[in-house]
Image (cartoon, rainbow, N blue to C red):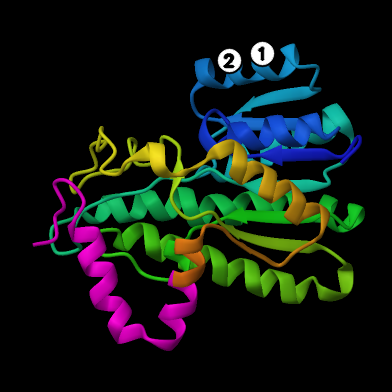
């Protein structure tokens, strides 16, 4: 990673922030984006204090023009792009029969179209560098989770897009990694949208028992260095992907029961 240029979307907290630090400590020059100016500035200051060369770009991945600006500012500052980490994301929790469709649209705009826009504008530079595109997906991109229809749909769409892109880029030597961390301690559940689009607030899960964002970032760094195609983390995540392939009917019941045990679950 020495002197590589890495763009990380949604880097003002959680896995994005952890990736900025981990890749920066490995020698990369880091460009971070986010929608909250104060949080983004705090992360940039944190990186600078640790001797990490960085640039902060205020940008909303769901806005196409912001992605163009992100790339233009990166090229102006560093002249190249070696790795794009599509990390910006949002979740939701509500039954499909109850949810406002604008909630689904917002989740798709950020999780899927945000990945699409960022990758589109970075791609010419990644082709030139024979670089890497990373999509921070989820086990929900392999197995649909009840009460998270919009989130699962967005991650399935992201994975389909990235798998196709990897095939298209086969002879151009662009590496594409689909990373599925499983449940990770971050603020994604606190910021998850409820049925009417308001933030959920409290996480319905015990964050203390989850893999940390820093651990996830370390795994992503190693997967990029090894140019892996998939990264599925946690024993629970690996079992879910495996069992869903071979025992889908049984997994329907298991997943339903697991999600129904969450506090205040919309599942009856």
Which mark, residue 120?
none
Q: Check disc 2: other Cα within 10 Å, few if <14, some if 14-19, many if 20+.
A: some
Q: Is residue 73 visible?
A: no
Which region of the structure is painted magenta?
Answer: 240-268
Q: Which residue is mark 2?
A: 42
Quadrant of the drawing holding the C terminus: bottom left
Q: Which residue lies at the image location 51% right of the left edge and 15% below the top edge?
A: 38
Q: Check disc 1: other Cα within 10 Å, few if <14, some if 14-19, many if 20+.
A: some
Residue 265 in picture, x, y percent from top left = 16, 52
Say which quarter of the image contains residue 161.
Answer: bottom right
Q: Are marks 1 and 2 in contact (CB under 8 Å)?
A: yes
Element under label 2? helix
Question: Magenta stretch containing residue 255, yes or no?
Answer: yes
Say which quarter of the image contains residue 124.
Answer: bottom right
- The CA span between labels 1 and 2 is 5 Å
Q: Which residue lies at the image location 55% right of the left edge and 28% below the top edge?
A: 12
Q: Which residue is mark 1?
A: 45
Quadrant of the drawing holding the N terminus: top right
Q: Which residue lies at the image location 73% right of the left edge and 24% below the top edge?
A: 55
């Amino acid at each position: 990673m020495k002197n590589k240029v890495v763009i990380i979307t949604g880097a003002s907290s959680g896995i994005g922030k952890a990736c900025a630090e981990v890749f920066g400590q490995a020698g990369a020059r880091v460009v971070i984006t986010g929608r909250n100016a104060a949080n983004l500035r705090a992360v940039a200051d944190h990186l600078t204090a640790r001797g990490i060369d960085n640039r902060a770009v205020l940008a909303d991945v769901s806005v196409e023009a912001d992605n163009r600006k992100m790339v233009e500012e990166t090229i102006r500052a560093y002249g190249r792009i070696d790795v794009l980490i599509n990390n910006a994301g949002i979740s939701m929790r509500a039954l499909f029969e109850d949810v406002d469709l604008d909630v689904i649209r917002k989740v798709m705009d950020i999780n899927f179209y945000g990945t699409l826009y960022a990758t589109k504008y970075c791609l010419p530079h990644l082709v030139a560098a024979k670089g890497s595109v990373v999509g921070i997906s989820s086990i929900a991109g392999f197995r649909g989770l009840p009460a998270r229809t919009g989130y699962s749909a967005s991650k399935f769409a992201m994975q389909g897009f990235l798998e196709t892109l990897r095939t298209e880029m086969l002879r151009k030597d662009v590496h594409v990694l689909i990373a599925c961390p499983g449940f990770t301690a971050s603020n994604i559940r606190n910021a998850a949208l409820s049925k009417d689009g308001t933030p959920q607030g409290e996480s319905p899960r015990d964050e203390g028992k989850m893999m940390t964002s820093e651990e996830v970032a370390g795994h992503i760094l190693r997967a990029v260095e090894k140019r892996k195609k998939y990264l599925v983390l946690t024993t629970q995540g690996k079992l879910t992907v495996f069992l869903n392939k071979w025992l889908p009917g049984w997994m329907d019941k298991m997943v339903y029961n697991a999600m129904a045990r969450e506090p205040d679950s919309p599942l009856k």
